[in-house]
Image (spheres, rainbow, N blue to C red):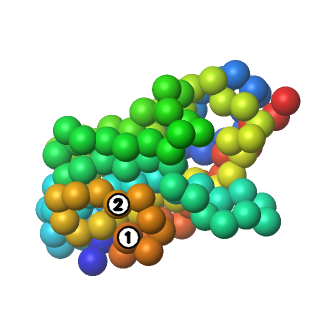
Amino acid sequence: QVQLVESGGGLVQAGDSLRLSCAASGRRTFSSYSMGWFRQAPGKEREFVAAINYNGRSTHYADSVKGRFTISRDNAKNTVYLQMNSLPPEDTAVYYCAARLGIYYGIGVNEYNYWGQGTQVTVSS
């Protein structure tokens, strides 16, 4: 079991940046998990944003955020981050952190066992 708590969301203007954080706690060491970020806009399904493997050396991004978002992790701090730059209004959504036991990340919602409560990101035009 792992508990995930996201933070860092808020209201920004188009073109601004935000950094989301996800703090993990639980009995297993944080490096036992690969991590992902997903988002869900109103009326839409939850979609993949970015993922990172257990040691941070491998990452993957959705095409819509590639080049603008960066996922990273600090295993010493049990935290995964999502740096979001050049935000357009279309990035408005609730952003969720997710954990998957194992060294390989996944890109599907069903591949993750543990989820945070989400943090709202609103980008105004």
Q: Are marks 2 and 1 in contact (CB under 8 Å)?
A: yes
Residue 121 drawn at (x, y percent):
67, 45
- Note whether 86 is above or below 99 in the view shown: above
* Residue 107 image offset from top left, x and y in percent: 41, 58
Query: In the rendered structure, which amino acid carries the disc numbered 2?
Result: Gly
What residue sits right under mark 2 in the picture?
106
For mark 2, give the secondary structure. loop
Along the viewing direction, whichever of 60 and 92 lies nearer the viewer:
60
Sequence-first disc among 2 and 1: 2
> Residue 103 versus residue 23: which sits nearer the camera?
103
| Residue shown at 44% from the left, 42% from the top | 61
Q: Is residue 20 visible?
A: no
Residue that protrudes farthest toward the right in the picture: 125
Q: Residues within 10 Å of mark 2 (few under 14, many from 20)?
A: many
Measured along the vertical axis of the image, is residue 16 above or below residue 24?
above
Give the residue at mark 1. 112
